[in-house]
Image (spheres, rainbow, N blue to C red):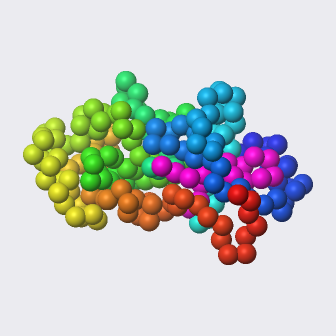
Amino acid sequence: MEDWVHRAVARWPNVPALYGWLALDRRGRWRIKGETISRPQIIDTLNRNYAADEHGRWFFQNGPQRGYVALARAPLLLRAEDDGSLWTHLGEAVKEVSAAYLDENGGLWFATPQGPAALHEQDSDWALEHLRLGSKPVSEAALATALALPSGQRTALVLHLGTLRLPVTRLDAAAAPAALGFISDPQPLPGERASH
């Protein structure tokens, strides 16, 4: 968070939180009331002041007011660079991944220090390059076998990230918020002041 945000919260600590205005779509694009935000300055401000509360609700802190974000997929969307590195939609390098998951549609999810993340749908080639069955590249048959497993079961696949080898667990997309600790559609808690 930026310093001006901390100062505003300290000065006006009881501003009701906003719900139902902000969203992050499946491609990591910010939306306000359904419209894509395209101004770079606004996107930069959103990116710099985006965080999660202790309940797993992600928000944008706009001065003293917190605007909770509805998530179409995950709090962070990852893109793969040509060198194989992963970057969040916020422009931060992902230096560590502690767990990897495969959903029923072949999408990859990650636990990272920055927060729960999903690989951008356009980077499926990166996923296929980094998934292995033993030491071999993943075949269509091995991928189909992994996709057919029940949610929560470890697959035979391993994700290769540099020298790191991560086992891949099958996880239904609908189960990802609970498994990774985030709330897709934040709502006010009992007793919490809110605006809609």
Q: Work out which quarter of the rendered image holds the C terminus and state it.
A: bottom right
Visible residue check, residue 92? no
Range shown magenta: 56-72
Residue 75: give x, y in percent of width and height: 52, 49
2 sits to left or right of 149: right
116 sits to left or right of 13: left
Identify which residue is drawn at 66% across, 57% down. 19
Visible residue check, residue 173? yes
Q: Main secondary structure of the magenta part?
A: strand
Furthest-top residue in view?
Answer: 82
Identify which residue is drawn at 83% across, 62% down. 14
> Please, is residue 42 above or below residue 8 in the view?
above
130 sits to left or right of 140: right
Identify which residue is drawn at 37% across, 25% down. 83
Residue 7: give x, y in percent of width and height: 85, 49
Identify which residue is drawn at 54% across, 59% down. 185
The magenta stretch spans residue 173 = no
Q: Work out which quarter of the rendered image holds the N terminus and state it.
A: top right
Front residue of this view, candidates 175 and 52 = 175
Front residue of this view, candidates 37 and 42 = 37
Residue 149: give x, y in percent of width and height: 19, 60
> Please, is residue 108 above or below residue 153 in the view?
above
